[in-house]
Amino acid sequence: MFNSLISSIKRWHNKPKAEKGANANSPAGNGRPPKPDSNKPSGTTKTSRVVVPRSDHCLSRRDVSRAALTVMKRLQEAGFEAYIVGGGVRDLLLGGHPKDFDVATDATPEQAKQLFRGARIVGRRFRILHARIGREVIEVTTFRGHHSDGEAHEAQQSEHGMLLRDNVYGDLESDAVRRDFTVNALYYTTDGFEIHDYTGGIRDIEQRQIRMIGDPETRYKEDPVRMLRAVRFAAKLDFEIEPATAAPLKELAPLLRNIAPARLFDEVLKLLMCGQGERTFELLREHHLWPHLFPDNARHLDSPEALALTRQALRNTDDRIRNDQRVTPAFLYAALLWPAVNAEQQFLTEKGIPPVPALAQAAQKITSNQLIHTAIPKRFSMPMRDIWEMQSRLPRRGGERAFRLMEHPKFRAAYDFLLLREDSGEIPAGLGQWWTEFQQADEQQRQQMVRDVPRNGARGSKSRGRRNRGGRNRNRSKRPNGGAEHPSN
Ligand code: ATP
Ligand code: MG
């Protein structure tokens, strides 16, 4: 589908101007983006509209969710314009499956609200309408305008150039240039089935480029989260970040400090828990953004074990998402912060604090540090700390302990985490294999395994022997969960 679309668009671009559809004001096939005009406020990039007619693209109404079609239809019947925009158009053009559809319209949120029973206007900085159709929620945004056209209370900027409010309304063209990247500013309408492109988005899809609309530095300053979005889309789509779009990232990365931790937590989930976590992590490091999200992880990455643990945790998460298995931020956060927690615990035990309280203190310190950067809701931070705490209990298996541990609601996650630590080389392999066998054994074998555990509670001689014979991969194939180290709860 991708190839046919691109070739048809190319064919269309290459036609002489006169042959193109009546709506085409200018060709977009000149290979260059519309240049940002530095004298104008950001987002007022000069545009040249390209309208790709129905016959020249393969995006079909059938690819769009029924709910999004209903929203568009209702808006159009009420006399408004309505377009699918953003990821919906972008991902369909690339042959993918959009995770949702966003609708852009010239109706104000209040006008649109009248058309959908139970719809809600959400957001302050950026007001949008959530229209519920069946079980789907469609985000309906009103075309944004240029700030110079609005009242002070509708658009507000901080002293650093950050947009505090962005509620000046405009038309399709002004909306297009206020979006972040050219590939996110393509509009598809069922009223004529055309794609509207004001910013060179189609060319950038063909050339697989993430390109900021307007002056990248200004646009990042308006909303520093756009830096994360550039990386996210590059990783997700396997696109390059165009050089001018990538250039300011290193210098502006500290602006992430000004973003509310709760918003950054949401962004982190989109970055690391959407199936491309490992690739995204590498790109975030490359562009110097990672230390501003996870400083305590970043300062340990010189250690090969910490780097291996981080990569492995992300890779496992990606694999699980691919296999439709559940993933939880608790496990991923546990892994990302573990090298720092572990180092801090060692530091405290060297000062004479016993290991268990040392771990609790270390966990407390590193968690509070992280909260300054990205929030961690309690429902994730509690299990995260359970996973850590159980690492010191898993070696102690004598008597009834192993049986009790297995009953713990976070046992499975803690066991997966132990395997992750072994795989990364942080601790020698062995204990994980013991637990793997223990879970697979029947009651009698379990009793025997527990009796065989040496008094000092460390590793059973049995698992040591197995480890030497089998090596890591052999262990992995025998794991009860098939080797996917991740929590199931
Ligand atoms: P996906 O939903 O697949 O993650 P998306 O491109 O649809 O990707 P959303 O976060 O759903 O991303 O946003 C929808 C659209 O809104 C984007 O495509 C973009 O046009 C615009 N947008 C979102 N966030 C910003 C931002 N911070 N600055 C400018 N435009 C934005
Ligand atoms: Mg979207």
Image (tube, rainbow, N blue to C red):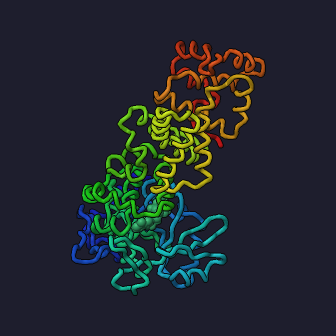
Residue 86 in view, yes or no? no
Q: Which of 82 and 395 is in front in this view?
A: 395
| Count of numbered circles in the view | 0
Left or right of residue 37: residue 261: right
- Say if 359 sits above or below 190 in the image: above
Left or right of residue 91: residue 361: right
Q: Could you tell me residue 265's position as x and y percent?
A: 50, 56
Residue farthest to the front, as pictured: 352
Which quadrant of the figure contains the C terminus? top right
Q: Could you tell me residue 259's position as x and y percent?
A: 43, 63
Left or right of residue 263: residue 439: right
Residue 117 in view, yes or no? yes
What residue is drawn where x is 48% and y is 43%?
Answer: 337
Residue farthest to the right, as pictured: 444
Q: Nearer the viewer, residue 472 or 454?
A: 454
- Say if 361 sits above or below 439 in the image: below
Q: Which of 283 and 25 is in front in this view?
A: 283
What residue is drawn where x is 62% and y is 17%?
Answer: 460
Rendering quarter of residue 397: top right
Q: Could you tell me residue 94's position as x and y percent?
A: 42, 54
What residue is drawn where x is 37% and y is 76%?
Answer: 157
Q: Could you tell me residue 485's position as x and y percent?
A: 57, 35
What residue is drawn where x is 62% and y is 41%?
Answer: 386
Left or right of residue 115: residue 152: left
- Say if 392 sits above or below 456 in the image: below
- Say if 373 sits above or below 180 in the image: above
